[in-house]
Amino acid sequence: MPETTYFPRYLILGGAMISGVLLALAVHMLGARYGLDLGGLWRSDTHEFMPAGAAIAWWLIASVGFSGGYFTANLMHSAVAGQIPQRMRQFLIVVGVLMLAGAGQAAAAPSTVSTVSAVLAGLAALCLGAVMAFCGAYFAQRKS
C-alpha cells in the first residue's frame, strides 16, 4: 500500500485563504447588486443606526469567507490522498467558475453608490474575507 502524501501546511493555508477571499469578494459583489452592500455603513442620508442590509452583508461575507477557507482546506487535505471522487471535483470546479462569473457580471454593472463608499466597502470586504478565510483554514488545519 503506497504511503499517503500531504500538501505542505502553508500551501494548504495559502490556497484556502485565496479561495475564501475570492468567494467572499464574489458574495460582496453579488450582494451589492441586490442591495446588500457594506456601503450602507457610510451613508449619511439614512437616519437609522445601521441599515439592516449592511449588517446582513457583513455576516454573509464573514460566513462565506470562513466556510470557504474551512472547506477548501479540508478538500485540499483530502485531495492529495485521492479521497475526492472525480465527479465531486468536477462539480466543485463548475460551481466555483459559475460563482466567479456571476460576480464578474455583477461587478461590471453600473453602481448606484458613490465611488468612495464602494472602495471602502470593497476594502472592508477584502479584509473581512481574508481574516475569516484564515480562521477557517487554520481551524481546518488544527482539526486534521
Image (spheres, helix red, strand yellow):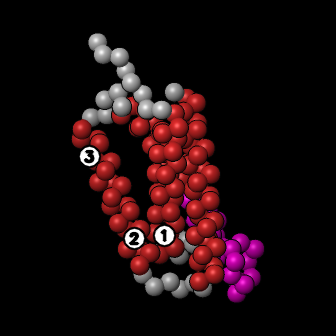
Q: Residues within 10 Å of mark 3 (few under 14, many from 20)?
A: few
Q: Secondary structure at mark 3?
A: helix
Residue range highlighted in magenta: 39-61
Spatial CA span between label 2 and label 1: 8 Å
Residue at screen point 62% across, 51% down:
131
Above or below, 4 relative to 113: above
Q: Which mark is residue 95?
A: none
Q: Secondary structure at mark 1?
A: helix
Q: What amino acid is labelled 3 in the image? A: Gln
Q: On the image, which quarter does residue 3 sit in?
A: top left
| Callout 2–callout 1 Cβ contact below 8 Å | yes
Query: Circle 3 sits on which residue?
Result: 90
Residue at screen point 45% across, 36% down:
74
Viewer-proximal residue among 128 and 4: 4
| Residue 116 horizontal/vertical position (percent) | 63, 81
Q: Is residue 104 left or right of residue 25?
A: left
| Callout 3–callout 1 Cβ contact below 8 Å | no
Residue at screen point 32% across, 61% down:
98
Q: Residues within 10 Å of mark 1 (few under 14, many from 20)?
A: many
Q: Is residue 19 left or right of residue 123?
A: left
Above or below, 92 relative to 121: above
Q: Is residue 136 left or right of residue 76?
A: right
Query: Circle 1 sits on which residue?
Result: 29
Query: Circle 2 sits on which residue?
Result: 104
